[in-house]
Image: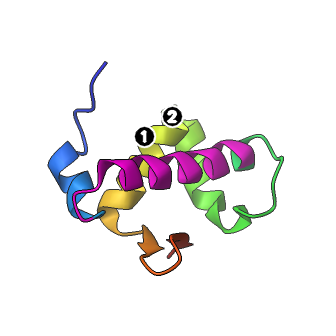
């Protein structure tokens, strides 16, 4: 299985070409999306529209996370390595 869209180069551009940071960002975001989809967490409540889109299109949480990274909706603070949702 390979990632076709978004392109890996586009993803790495958002994380200063750090593939480990990309993995951490996407993993954390996909976890939040998955929890929201299953109603287990309140932290991702503001993503209701993204969850509805995922259910309608059967998009997997990791795919949604990668798309959000490329679109700039998920970023990080290089001083604290905290994930920011826009």
Q: Is 17 a magenta residue?
A: yes
User: Image point 28% across, 64% down: which residue?
Assistant: 14
The image position of residue 30, as x and y in percent, is 56, 46
Q: CA distance from mark 1 to mark 2?
A: 5 Å
Query: How was the colour assigned to the protein in this rendering?
Result: rainbow
Residue annotated with mark 1: 63
Q: Is 76 a magenta residue?
A: no
The image position of residue 84, as x and y in percent, is 53, 73
User: Image point 53% across, 77% down: which residue?
Assistant: 80
The image position of residue 4, as x and y in percent, is 22, 33
Left of 61 or right of it: where is 4? left
Q: Label 2 near label 1: C-beta < 8 Å?
A: yes
Residue annotated with mark 2: 60
Disc number at residue 28?
none
Q: Badge 1 local density, few (<14 within 10 Å), some, or many (20+)?
A: some
The image position of residue 6, as x and y in percent, is 25, 45
Say which quadrant the N terminus sits in. top left
Residue range of the region highlighted in magenta in the rendering: 16-35
User: Image point 24% across, 40% down: which residue?
Assistant: 5
Q: Is residue 14 above or below residue 9?
A: below
Left of 82 or right of it: where is 32? right
Looking at the picture, tell me which residue is in the foreground, 17 or 68. 17
């Amino acid at each position: 299985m390979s990632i076709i869209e978004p392109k890996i180069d586009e993803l790495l551009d958002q994380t200063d070409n750090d593939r480990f940071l990309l993995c951490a960002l996407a993993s954390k975001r996909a976890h939040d999306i998955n929890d929201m989809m299953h109603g287990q967490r309140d932290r991702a409540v503001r993503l209701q529209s993204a969850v509805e889109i995922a259910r309608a299109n059967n998009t997997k949480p990791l795919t949604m996370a990668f798309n959000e990274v490329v679109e700039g909706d998920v970023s990080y603070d290089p001083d604290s390595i905290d994930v920011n949702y826009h």
